[in-house]
Amino acid sequence: MLQFSNSLTRLLGELKKLPGVGEKSALRLAFHLLKSPGNIEALAESLKQVAAKVGFCSVCFAITEEDPCWICSGDRDGSTLCVVEEPQDLLALERSRAFKGRYHVLQGTLSPLNGVTPADLRIAELLERLTAEGVKEVLIATNFTVEGEATALYLTKLIKPLNIRVTRLAHGIPIGSDLEYVDAATVQRAVEGRSEL
């Protein structure tokens, strides 16, 4: 078994806490950093700066340095609110430039098996926003996973009695794919969600 210094062992342990980083990746990253000490200083400084300056928007719970974030303080359509699981989902929608409204980040999904309940998410804040901001439509953009679908269903049951239109992201066959290679569940949803031309 390989023995490393205490500081390198600690670095490897911290790197392995990152998503998708196992033993080999942690070693590769650590050795890359050790080859150029300037990179270590720059990385350490940027991590300190992020820890000191970046937080969550008090309105939508997206990642921001200024509160409220640029979306909440900007000139966006306040009648439509898009609900996403995580801040990176918001970024994916913004990259598409297809959505012009505002957002609400839940900070996760319902997952009873993992102990995640509605109290652990930003659902209470969402309901407050819906009544206070005069929202007319909520676009639920949770992922198409078991947890994402359960969260979407739960939110729909909470929002519909408020006489607010609830919509869901469309899903189906990706552009550029061959029908013969798409799984049956995806084809079924694409047929069910078909639109008129």
Image: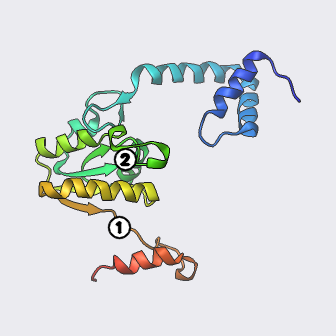
Answer above or below: position of 167 versus 76. below
Q: Which image quadrant: the N terminus?
A: top right
Answer above or below: position of 132 versus 52. below
Contact? badges 1 and 2 (CB < 8 Å): no
Q: Which image quadrant: the C terminus?
A: bottom left
Camera-nearest residue between 89 and 120: 120
Task: Please name the colour scheme applied to the rendered image.
Answer: rainbow
**Which amino acid is tagged 1?**
Ala
Answer above or below: position of 29 versus 180. above
Looking at the image, which residue is at 62% across and 33% down? Answer: 17
The residue tagged with tag 1: helix, strand or loop?
A: loop
Looking at the image, which residue is at 43% across and 54% down? Answer: 147
Camera-nearest residue between 192 and 39: 192
**Which amino acid is tagged 2?**
Leu
Residue 133 rendering spot, x and y as whole percentages: 13, 43
The answer to which quarter of the image holds residue 57 is top left
Badge 1: residue crowd in 10 Å (few <14, some 14–19, many ≥20): few
30 horizontally vs 146: left or right: right
The residue indicated by pointer 2 is 90
Residue lying furthest top in this view? 6
First in sequence: mark 1 vs mark 2: 2
Q: How many angstroms separate mark 1 from mark 2 (CA)? A: 16 Å
| Residue 45 seen in render | yes
Badge 2: residue crowd in 10 Å (few <14, some 14–19, many ≥20): many
The answer to which quarter of the image holds residue 128 is top left
The residue indicated by pointer 1 is 170
Looking at the image, which residue is at 39% across and 59% down? Answer: 149
Residue 158 rendering spot, x and y as whole percentages: 22, 53
138 horizontally vs 24: left or right: left
| Residue 98 seen in render | no
Picture mark count: 2
Answer above or below: position of 175 versus 117. below
